[in-house]
């Protein structure tokens, strides 16, 4: 990849970690951003410090993301691909059960505000290199879900991806919305998993790399990927 640089938020586990592995295999330098410093450092040891940079980052904080971008540029001098992947859900619904105002606020700040900040701070660097911006949505960003607030945040991400794509027309930037169904990741640690076959994190990582590996004139806008048998 001629020393191209791939920045991933939410890189310490699951889809982010799997994508980092695929990116390094494809020849990218990677910037690994997440709140879990220890997990990131283990990945840097595995990939080699010449290939990877770990950045402890809370995507819900503007300054934390600004430092992520600054450190990336200081280390590698450029950013070519950005995967705004950080996000979480704990299953909050609009009716019944316990009130969870702090959880709600964090979910909106990470899933929506965090993704928007990632775009705002990295797109100027991507424009310099004709880069690629990818963002993790969800199947429940196009269908309704009983996990209502989480689903609403992912509907917001769906709209954000389209808005960014429209805004970047004429810049050479490609924008891809990744919409996974049920994936066997730590995302489900606090949720009841629907009965279905599960995707693996690497299934999503391969989809990400498919979009990234296309010729510059090919912009894969959306990848909706469900496990076989998932009805919704």
Image (cartoon, grey):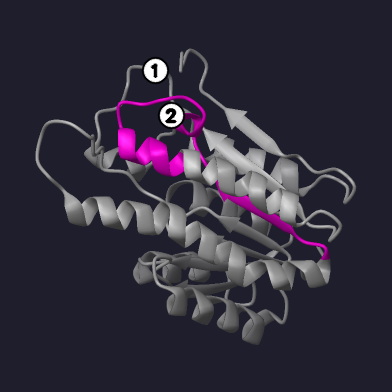
Residue 10 visible in the shown view: no
Q: How crowded is the residue under tag 1: few (<14 C-alpha within 10 Å), some, or many (20+)?
A: few
Spot occupied by residue 17 in the image (x, y as percentages of width and height)? 50, 54
Spot occupied by residue 48 in the image (x, y as percentages of width and height)? 58, 71
Res 128 quadrant in image = bottom right
Residue nearest the viewer, comparing 184 with 182: 182
Is 29 placed above or below 115 here?
A: below
Q: How far is the residue under mark 2 from the one under mark 1? A: 8 Å
**Dot 1 lies on which element?**
loop
- Give the side of residue 211 with respect to residue 185, left or right: right
- Give the side of residue 14 with respect to residue 19, left or right: left
Q: How crowded is the residue under tag 2: few (<14 C-alpha within 10 Å), some, or many (20+)?
A: many
Which numbered disc, 2 or 1, marks the residue that appears first in the sequence? 2
Q: Is residue 110 magenta?
A: no
Is 149 placed above or below 118 here?
A: above
Looking at the rendered structure, which numbered label has been put on residue 5?
Answer: none
Circles 2 and 1 in contact, beta carbons < 8 Å: yes
Identify the residue shown where x is 60% and y is 56%.
Answer: 83
Residue interval drawn in magenta: 130-154
The residue tagged 1 is: 196
Residue 102 visible in the shown view: yes
Q: Is residue 148 magenta?
A: yes
Spot occupied by residue 161 in the image (x, y as percentages of width and height)? 62, 47
Looking at the rendered structure, which numbered label has been put on residue 182?
Answer: 2
Spot occupied by residue 42 in the image (x, y as percentages of width and height)? 43, 67
- Give the side of residue 165 with respect to residue 60, left or right: right
**Dot 2 lies on which element?**
loop
Identify the residue shown where x is 66% and y is 55%.
Answer: 23
What is the tally of numbered marks visible in this picture? 2
């Amino acid at each position: 990849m001629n020393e191209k640089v791939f920045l991933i938020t939410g890189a310490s586990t699951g889809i982010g970690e799997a994508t980092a592995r695929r990116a390094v295999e494809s020849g990218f330098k990677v910037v690994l951003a997440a709140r879990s410093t220890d997990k990131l450092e283990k990945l840097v040891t595995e990939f080699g410090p010449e290939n990877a940079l770990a950045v402890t980052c809370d995507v819900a904080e503007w300054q934390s993301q600004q430092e992520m971008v600054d450190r990336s540029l200081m280390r590698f001098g450029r950013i070519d691909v950005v995967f705004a992947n950080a996000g979480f859900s704990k299953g909050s619904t609009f009716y019944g059960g316990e009130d969870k105002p702090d959880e709600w606020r964090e979910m909106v700040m990470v899933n929506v505000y965090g993704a928007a900040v990632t775009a705002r701070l990295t797109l100027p660097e991507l424009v310099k290199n004709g880069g690629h911006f990818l963002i993790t949505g969800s199947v429940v960003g196009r269908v309704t879900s009983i996990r209502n607030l989480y689903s609403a945040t992912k509907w917001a991400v769906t709209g954000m991806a389209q808005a960014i794509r429209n805004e970047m027309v004429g810049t050479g930037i490609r924008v891809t919305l990744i919409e996974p169904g049920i994936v066997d990741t730590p995302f489900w640690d606090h949720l009841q998993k629907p009965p279905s076959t599960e995707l693996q994190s690497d299934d999503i990582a391969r989809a990400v790399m498919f979009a990234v590996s296309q010729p510059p004139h090919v912009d894969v806008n959306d990848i909706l990927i469900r496990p076989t048998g998932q009805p919704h």
